[in-house]
Amino acid sequence: MRLRRIVMPEIARAGEVIEIRTVILHPMITGHTAAGAGVSGRRIVHTFHVHYDGAEVFRAELGPGIAANPLLTFTTVATRTGDVVFTWMDDTGETAVETRLLTVAPA
């Protein structure tokens, strides 16, 4: 998959609610054209999930009505230092994974 951007703090205080924004540049081909449905193969990001320190903290199931280059914003609570792993999956079986470290300082 193409370029992925993630905006999130690198450091947070324990118990702080942090905002995370992600975008992936992806063609998002619905498979519907002026020539009719199914003429071109569908290719959309259908699943996006985020794990923080091993636990799933966000999941989105996307459909053909989603925009190209989907932007997703969500919040989570900083509990302890750990990896935040972002995973996008599309209809072709392609998977993109990005990892960011969130360092959590004492409150």
Image (spheres, rainbow, N blue to C red):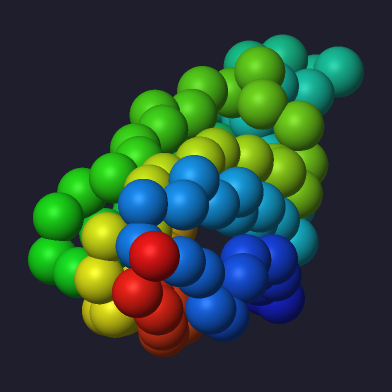
From this viewpoint, which residue is outermost toward the front? Answer: 107
| Residue 93 visible to the viewer | no
Near-viewer residue (8 or 33): 8
Query: Taking the image as drawn, is residue 104 in sight?
Result: yes
Q: Position of residue 106 (x, y in %)?
A: 35, 74
Q: Residue at x 62, y 66 (%)?
A: 8
Quadrant for the C terminus in the image:
bottom left
Kindly indicate the quadrant of the structure image that contains residue 70: top right
The relative height of residue 87 versus residue 70 in the rendered view (above or below) is below
* Vertical placement of residue 36 versus 45, above or below: above
Which residue is found at the position 50% from the left and 69% from the top?
12
Is 95 placed above or below 77 here? below
Q: Is residue 33 left or right of residue 38?
A: right
Position of 83 relative to 66 (above/below): below
Residue 37 locus on image (x, y percent): 63, 16
Give the camera-side residue of 30 and 79: 79
Question: Hey, which quadrant is residue 104 in on the image?
Answer: bottom left
> Residue reaching furthest right?
34
Q: Position of residue 94 (x, y in %)?
A: 40, 66
- Pick the quarter of the image with the N terminus: bottom right
